[in-house]
Structure formats: C-alpha cells, structure tokens
Image (tube, grey):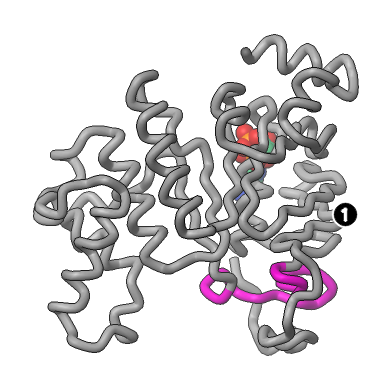
Amino acid sequence: TEQAPSRLPSPRVAPSVAPTTNSHLDISEVTKNFGSQAVLKGVNLSVARGGTTAIVGPSGSGKTTLLRLIAGFEHPNTGSISLNGNPVAGDGVRVPAHRRHVGYVAQDGALFPHLTVGQNVAFGLDAGKLDGGRRAVRARVEALLDMVSLDPAMAKRRPHQLSGGQQQRVALARALAREPELMLLDEPFSALDAGLRVATRRAVAKVLNAAGVTTILVTHDQAEALSFADQVAIMRGGRLAQIGNPFVVYTRPADRATAEFLGEAV
Ligand code: ADP
C-alpha cells in the first residue's frame, strides 16, 4: 500500500543526474519485514547496466520480495535502492513504480483474460504518447509481438487460446511495451514443459540482449541460471549468501549449505 505522498520529502536527486558508474542497480543493506517476520535481512546487490543476474534459492527465501522492492510494489524497512545512481527507495525517498522504468513478468504472466492479446500488449503502451492514435498503437503492438516471435495475427486472440509459452511471450511483449531499462523476470518459464522452456528462454534472452535491457531473473533452474546470467546470486534465509560469476559460484560454493542447495537442485 502506498503512503500518502504528502508525507514524503521529494527525491533528493533529480532523475536527470548523469550516472557516474556503470552500475544500473545498487541495493544496500535492504531489510523487509512482513509483520513480525523478517523476510529480507540485509541484502546487498549491484547489477551492471546491460547485465544479466540470476537469483536462485529455496522457496520462501525472499526472491520475489526482493524483485517487488526493486519494482517499487513494496518498500524496504531499512536500507536503500538506487537506479542509475539515483536513490529510488530508502532514507525518505520513494519513487513510485511507474517512474522506475522497470518491467516485471510474473510466473504465470498474469494476462488479462477478458482482453485480446493485442489489448493486453497495448495496455503496456502509453498510448497518449503515440501520434496517429489507434493505427499507431496497432502497429506498435504488432511490432512488439514480432519482437517476441509471435505472429501479429495473434493480436485478435484471447489468452486462453494460446499455449503457455505463447502467453509468456505476450506477457513479455506487454512488459517490453513500456520500454523498461530493467526487466525483472520472476520464474517466467517455470510453468512450461522442458522443450518449450528452453526455446522460450532463448527467445526472451535474445530480445532483451538486443534491446540492451538489464535483466534480473529469479529461477529454480540451475541450467537456466547458468545459460542466462553473467552473475548468479544465491538467496538463502533473506540474505544473498554468495554473488559471483556463474562458473565460480557453481565450482566454488562459499559454504556447505550453498553447495548442498546447488547439488540438490541440479
Ligand atoms: P521466494 O520468492 O524465495 O519463494 P518470497 O519472497 O515469495 O520467497 O517469500 C518470502 C517469505 O515472505 C515467505 O515466508 C512469504 O510467506 C512471506 N511473504 C511474502 N510476501 C508477503 C506478504 N505480502 N505478506 C506477508 N508475508 C509475505
């Protein structure tokens, strides 16, 4: 739930301030409680611009909560989050989700079932910004569907007429419509069967890479993390137990629990 904006000081750093590092996202000592439950207990993470980070860890370890904090759907109790060097959360700063240029795709895609595929994608567009009205919206929707390797003719269908993999691509197209600088993918392929999962993952990675979008992927799948990411972070009990390049994390786990988790999940 959003706090009354009037109680918050305005952001201390104007969004136009040029970033001084190559860091896109910086999370510092972030904690999050739900009631008396401490879900995040001091998370630190940096993601380079254009980088791809996979977050892996047991169910309930806080992965989704961390993504929701980055997106701006939740707010940390303590600690801070910066995007492009500008604070967006913490220390009295609270930049709302729609001003963070962040896309979010959930596990089930969560398409609107009563809208067509085209309407779902158009929902992500800020139609007011497009000159040419409906025709421009339609052209943009078709371009977005094409970008995720879907036939533009699918725009007229309803989500339930599509396969799971196709629905996930529509969800991605809807998120891409907002032209995010940072894309958060929360187990977006987990509902798909093995073959489709690999194909969809490859298609998604290609689109995001081509667009230079910084990406954070939450996954249970070790192979997915390895093939997708240039940085892997292991989440356990509300902390990032290890962060590093995938090869190092997998060959030199920082502790026994991480080694056991990685071994178990392969
Ligand atoms: P993961 O994504 O690693 O499975 P989550 O971030 O979804 O973990 O959840 C971590 C813990 O936080 C769980 O115990 C979950 O029940 C709790 N939790 C998550 N969101 C809420 C919420 N909105 N209200 C209360 N508890 C929550």
Q: Is residue 38 left or right of residue 170?
A: right
Residue at 65 percent of width and 51 percent of height: 51
Based on the displayed image, in which of its 4 quarters is residue 221 positioned? top right
Image quarter hosting the C terminus: top right
Residue at x 72%, y 48% (from the top left corner): 34
Task: Name which residue lies at 74% across and 17% down.
Answer: 261
Residue 230 belongs to magenta span: no
Q: How many marks?
A: 1
Magenta extent: 83-99
Q: Is residue 86 magenta?
A: yes
- The percent position of residue 160, horizontal first and vertical second, equals 18, 40
Residue that appears at 81% across and 20% down = 258
Q: Secondary structure at mark 1?
A: strand
119, above or below 32, in the image: below
Amino acid at pointer 1: Glu
Q: Which residue is mark 1?
A: 29
Between 80 and 249, the residue placed more toward the observer is: 249
From the viewer's perspective, is residue 229 above or below residue 125?
Answer: above
Where does residue 59 sit, x and y in percent of width and height?
64, 27
Image location (x, y in percent) of residue 29: 87, 54
- Residue toward you, 98 or 151: 151
Ligand 1 occupies quarter: top right
In front of the other: 121 or 69: 121
